Image (tube, rainbow, N blue to C red):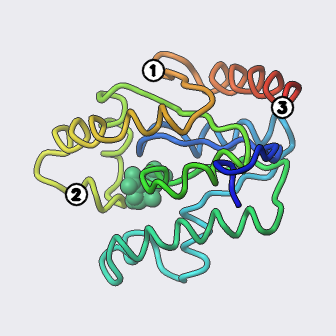
Amino acid sequence: MNAETTNTIPARNIILVGFMGSGKSTIGRELGKLLSYPLIDTDTKIEEHEKFSVADIFSLRGESFFRTCETQAIEQLLSEGVTHHIIATGGGLPMKKQNRPLLRELGYVVWLDANTETLLERTSRNNNRPLLQTENPRETIEKMLEQRNDIYQEVSHLHLQTTGLNVAETAHGILESARYFFGHS
Ligand code: S3P
């Protein structure tokens, strides 16, 4: 059973989704501090479980293995009954259809959005994202956003455009809407 077939009340977590470089980890840490909720990062959870970095998992086992690990990671959070946490997800996690109801079952889903310029600037600071190791990362980002934005929209309860907002403003905005959501769910 999942949120598609039942009217499950979502657990009290805040789930951050969005493209690579949209600030999920940074905002997640800030939210965690404000609420005194621990932060879980699905990439980190997978790395700890597999004992390899995401980049190594992609090159050694392939992307589809990594996607299976992502589903297992959120299934595990649900089966453990995790609550009162901030959960930062890998940018591709909502792309698998079966993951979307699971994310909404886990809590309040927030799409952190930013413009291409910001995403490019943040993701070019290091080379640990296998999908952006291309000749033209700007073009890659634009193409991926075209494929992904509708899905981020579909899975999220809140869409937040963060370009021009600082970390504190973004976190406070999320906090206010999450309180309202949890107060009414
Ligand atoms: C990916 C995003 C990455 C990581 C992997 C694939 C994606 O996480 O899961 O490199 O498909 O968008 P971040 O969004 O935290 O960078």
Specify which label sits upstream in the sequence, 1 or 2: 2
Residue 23, image x and y in percent? Answer: 52, 38
Relative to 51, is 11 on the left or the right? Answer: right
**Residue at image coords 66%, 66%:** 75
Q: SS of the residue at dot 2?
A: loop
Q: SS of the residue at dot 1?
A: loop
The residue beneath circle 2 is 133
Foreground residue, 4 or 166?
4
Q: Residue furthest front?
A: 5
Specify which label sits upstream in the sequence, 3 or 2: 2
**Residue at image coords 54%, 82%:** 50
Foreground residue, 168 or 64?
64
- Callout 3 amino acid: Ser
Q: CA distance from mark 3 to mark 1?
A: 29 Å
**Residue 46 position by quadrant:** bottom right
The residue beneath circle 1 is 163
Q: Label for residue 185?
A: 3
Residue 71, image x and y in percent? Answer: 55, 66
Q: Height in image: 177 above or below 157?
A: above
Q: Are marks 3 and 2 in contact (CB under 8 Å)?
A: no
Residue 37, image x and y in percent? Answer: 83, 46
**Residue at image coords 34%, 70%:** 63
Q: CA distance from mark 3 to mark 2?
A: 41 Å
Q: Height in image: 42 above or below 108?
A: below
- Callout 1 amino acid: Thr
Number of residues whose C-alpha sits closer than 10 Å to that of mark 3, classed few (under 14), some (14–19) or many (20 or more): few
- Callout 2 amino acid: Gln
The residue mark sitting in front, 3 or 2, is: 3
